[in-house]
Image: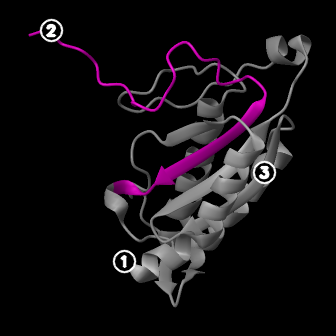
Amino acid sequence: MPNHRRRNSNRLDGYDYSLPGAYFVTIATYRRAALFGHNSAGEAILNDLGLIEQEEWRTTVELRREVRLDEFIIMPNHIHAILFIDEITLGERAAFIQTVGAHGRAPLQRRPRTLGSMIAAYKAATTRRIREHSKTPDLTVWQRNFYDRIIRDQLELDNVREYIHYNPLKLSEG
């Protein structure tokens, strides 16, 4: 039996995730632990760790000028968000090299200014702050990888915005 590496099934093979466009992402906590708060009466109530997540997500646009944030929500055990990657010049792309710390299966370098490099940097920053805040230096915050979907048109964008907006209500019903 051949030994195939399992890929995240929602990624499009050969797609350049640094291309301008709209993306819907979901990032889940390790083992779906409710680290960021709780859900009450259809509303996500964030604790201190959830507020750290929210602050770091908003900081993303300050650190990455090619990124624009849209609708997002921090839930007790995940984040749903829409973001846009805007066009950058070839000079900016060539001059920018981002090295992220390797862990287990992560590459030593990621292609700069891609959706994956942005999510990796976000996860690293939030993990560092959460470990510091909780005084738990070995806490595993995030599940490996993340879910993404390319948003192809206005109808899909509107549907994803609605999904994000009503996500806390869905947890109350279930």
Q: Which residues are magenta?
A: 1-30
SS majority, magenta: loop
Amino acid on which the number 1 mark rests in the picture = Gly
Callouts 1 and 2 close, C-beta under 8 Å: no
Q: State the residue in front, 36 or 7.
A: 7
Please say if 173 is above or below 85. Answer: below
Q: How is the image coloured?
A: one colour
Mark nearest the camera among 1 and 3 is 1
| Towards the viewer: 127 or 47 | 47
For the residue labelled by badge 3, is the local secondary structure a helix, a strand or a loop?
Answer: strand
Q: Secondary structure at mark 1?
A: loop
Q: Is residue 7 magenta?
A: yes
Quadrant in the picture for the N terminus: top left
Q: CA gap, disc 1 to disc 2?
A: 40 Å
Can residue 56 be spotted in the picture?
no
Q: Amino acid at mark 3?
A: Leu
Label whose residue precedes the other's in the sequence (1 or 3): 3
Q: Which residue is mark 3?
A: 69
Residue 9 position by quadrant: top left
**Residue 6 to residue 93: above or below:** below
Mark 2 Cα shell of 10 Å, populated few (<14), some (14-19), many (≥20): few
Instruction: Give the number of the mark in front: 1 or 2.
Output: 1
Query: For mark 2, what is the residue?
Result: 2
Tell me which amino acid carries mark 2: Pro
